DNA sequence: CGTTGAACCTGTTTGC
DNA sequence: TGCAAACAGGTTCAAC
């Protein structure tokens, strides 16, 4: 459910609704998706949610420690990743608790923040200082912030397939399967194209397409394929504007050719075989090439 | 560097 | 209808 636009939508909602609230208590169910459940159980009670940010597909809840425990502690943040099926939203305590709700954080305004995740591919960690900085540093640039010049330079240095590169969170932070396919369709680039072989106009088109797609998806409140909901329980609408993702067999919006599906980088990839021209066969596999070990 | 496939989980959809 | 396989918004690891 969650790629950058969905997380951004949720962050905006949560910012409006839970920033400033104090966490009264921590109730945990299954905890195998947490780095350190004991640290979370111990560290959260009494903290005020001072700010909420998005970093790639991560939520960062900035915490202000209770005044009593104050001295000497670096400011901590709760890092949350929704994986494939995670949900994070505030509820009234009387609302029935859905199955697979693993974290309940009662707040000081008669509501509780709930984390629900059937598959538990998500992640939750209480981090501060170097651990927090390191976690962010090991990921790549924000797709909506990277400059065209930087993007072109970094693309030219890679011989990976475009689809694999867009999904690589150390290259760009926040793009997932839907928005990779959508960006490639808009840029008219085949998922198997090797990044370094793009012409300058093609690379610029990809930078532009990615920004356009993500911005439009955020404006639409994200994509709701099965069950994504924002902080107020509302679905996103960007799925009705998908041009490639999950459209196998349906006509391309540009040329009417049937959208095809193939597995690239282990994920379903959808593209128009006519507008997104396949690279020459020799270019599909990554050859050893000349790697200048020097610099 | 890059690729593939498996693993981690549960739920839903598809196919015979 | 029933049961099994395939598939799902993600990440990580081993093996090549």
Image (cartoon, coloured by chain):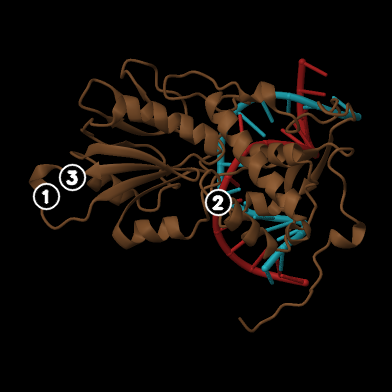
Chain colours: A brown, B cyan, C red
**Secondary structure under the numbered disc 2 in the rendered image:** loop
- Position of A48 relative to A220 (above/below): below
CA separation in Å, label 2 and label 1: 40 Å
Tag 3's secondary structure? Answer: loop
In the displayed structure image, the side of residue A1 where residue A192 appears, left or right: right
**Residue located at (70% from left, 36% from top):** A182
Cα distance, mark 3 to mark 2? 36 Å
Q: Are discs 2 and 1 both within one chain?
A: yes
Q: Tell me whether the residue at label 1 lies in contact with that at label 3, contact meaning CB atoms closer than 8 angstroms.
A: yes
Q: Which residue has dot 1 on it?
A: A70
Q: Secondary structure at mark 1?
A: loop
Q: Are marks 3 and 2 on the same chain?
A: yes
Residue at 70 percent across and 28 percent down: it is A242
Q: Which mark is residue A65?
A: 3
Question: Who comes first in sequence, dot 1 or dot 3?
Answer: 3
Q: Quadrant of residue A91?
A: top left
Chain containing mark 1? A
């Amino acid at each position: 459910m969650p790629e950058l636009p969905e997380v951004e939508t949720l962050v905006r909602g949560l910012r409006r609704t839970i920033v400033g609230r104090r966490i009264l208590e921590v109730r945990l169910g299954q905890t195998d998706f947490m780095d350190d459940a004991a640290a979370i159980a111990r560290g959260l009670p009494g903290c005020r949610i001072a700010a909420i940010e998005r970093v790639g597909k991560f939520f960062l809840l900035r915490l202000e420690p209770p005044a009593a425990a104050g001295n000497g502690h670096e400011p901590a943040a709760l890092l949350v990743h929704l994986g494939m099926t995670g949900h994070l939203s505030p509820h009234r305590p009387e609302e029935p608790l859905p199955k697979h709700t693993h974290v309940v954080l009662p707040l000081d305004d008669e509501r509780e923040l709930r984390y629900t995740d059937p598959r538990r591919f998500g992640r939750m960690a209480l981090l501060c200082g170097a651990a927090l900085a390191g976690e962010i540093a090991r990921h790549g640039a924000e797709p909506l912030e990277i400059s065209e010049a930087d993007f072109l330079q970094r693309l030219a240095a890679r011989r990976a397939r475009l689809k694999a590169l867009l999904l690589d969170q150390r290259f760009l932070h926040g793009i997932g399967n839907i928005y990779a396919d959508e960006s490639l369709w808009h840029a008219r680039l085949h998922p198997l194209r090797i990044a370094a072989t793009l012409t300058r106009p093609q690379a610029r088109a990809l930078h532009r397409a990615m920004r356009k797609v993500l911005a439009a998806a955020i404006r639409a409140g994200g994509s709701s394929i099965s069950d994504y909901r924002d902080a107020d329980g509302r679905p996103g609408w960007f799925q009705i504007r998908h041009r490639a993702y999950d459209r196998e067999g349906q006509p391309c919006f540009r040329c009417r050719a049937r959208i095809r599906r193939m597995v690239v980088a282990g994920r379903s990839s959808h593209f128009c075989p006519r507008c997104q021209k396949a690279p020459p066969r020799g270019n599909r596999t990554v050859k050893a090439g000349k790697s200048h070990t020097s610099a």
